[in-house]
Amino acid sequence: MSKLGRALWGLLLLMRPWDWLRNLLLLVPIAFATQTMDLDLATRVGMALLLFSSASAALYCLNDVVDRHLDAQ
């Protein structure tokens, strides 16, 4: 694996995508909505899912940077 590939893999691991699964709870209201085939609703929920996942990834990265000295001990 190239140096860039290792860096990108490390970044992906730092963002903890396996913890994003709880963000899928945003999809639950669509199951109970009367307009399940509404494209606007699906777009808004998809954007919310993307934003929540991005925000959680950013917070994981920030937390790891701030706590790096404590984690090293």
Image: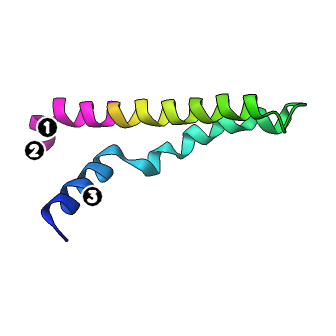
Q: Quadrant of residue 22?
A: top right
Q: Are marks 3 and 1 in contact (CB under 8 Å)?
A: no
Residue on which disc 3 sits: 9
Please state the horizontal and vertical placement of residue 48, each as a whole percent of the image.
Answer: 58, 29
Please state the horizontal and vertical placement of residue 39, each as a whole percent of the image.
Answer: 76, 34
SS majority, magenta: helix
Cα–Cα span, label 2 and label 1: 6 Å
Residue 72 image label? 2
Instruction: Tell me the kind of residue under disc 1.
Output: Arg
Of the 4 image quadrants, the one containing the C terminus is top left
Please state the horizontal and vertical placement of residue 30, each as a whole percent of the image.
Answer: 78, 35
Residue 42: in magenta span: no
Instruction: Tell me the kind of residue under disc 2.
Output: Ala
Task: Please provide the residue range marked out in magenta.
Answer: 59-73
Residue 19 image label? none
Circle 2 or circle 1, nearest the eye: 1
Front-most of residues 68 and 51: 51
Q: Determine the residue positioned at 57% across, 35% down.
A: 49
SS assignment at label 3: helix
SS assignment at label 2: helix
Residue 1 left/right relative to 73: right
